[in-house]
Image (spheres, rainbow, N blue to C red):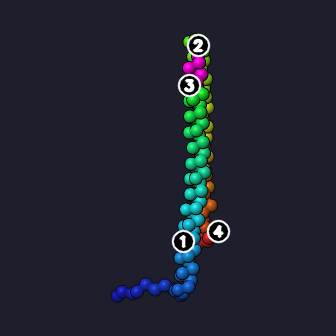
Amino acid sequence: MSTKPTLPNANPAELAEMGKKQVEAMIDVQKEFINAIEEVNREWAARVKAEQDLATEFAGKLTAARSIPETAAICQEWMSRRMELFAEDSRRLVADIQKFTMATARVLPKSLMGGNS
């Protein structure tokens, strides 16, 4: 005994509207993630630039150093600054993860409920 599955009250206009809302929800999800990715990309590009500037600055200082103690002080300053940048990178990574998590949280309920804004 086989029965055909039927859609209760399958109104084509309602089905089309549901499909439209789902597509809009997916587009919203993609927009949220693209915006988050672009923001993170800009921040990390600025970080790379800061690293380049730091390397250039310290290369100039090392070139100008006239003694071993001066060179040691420059190297110590370099390592200190690198540790600061590492700590900033760690904080930035956590913040980036939070941005993606928040973007997901903002759009996921809408996409599950079929809403579109």
Mark 3 and mark 4 residues within 8 Å of each other at the beta carbon: no
Q: In the picture shown, does residue 61 fall above or below 66?
A: below
Q: Classify mark 4: helix, strand or loop.
A: loop
Q: Amino acid at mark 3?
A: Ala
Q: Quadrant of the C terminus?
A: bottom right
Separation of disc 3 and disc 4 at Cα? 52 Å
Q: Earlier in the sequence, mark 4 or mark 1?
A: 1
Residue found at the far left of this picture: 1
The amino acid type, in three-letter code, at marker 2 is Arg
The residue at 58%/24% (across/down) is 60
- Can residue 108 be seen in this snapshot? no
Residue receiving disc 2? 66
The image shows residue 59 at horizontal and vertical percentages of 56, 25
Question: Between marks 3 and 2, how big is the CA–CA gap?
Answer: 14 Å
Between circles 3 and 4, the one closer to the viewer is: 3
Residue 59 - label: 3
Amino acid type of the residue that numbered disc 4 sits on in the rendered structure: Ser
Q: For the residues marked 1 and 2, what is the alpha-carbon distance in whole angstroms? A: 66 Å
Q: In the image shown, does 48 or 82 lie closer to the viewer?
A: 48
Q: Earlier in the sequence, mark 3 or mark 4?
A: 3
Q: Which residue is mark 4?
A: 117
Check the image and report above or below for 60 versus 106: above
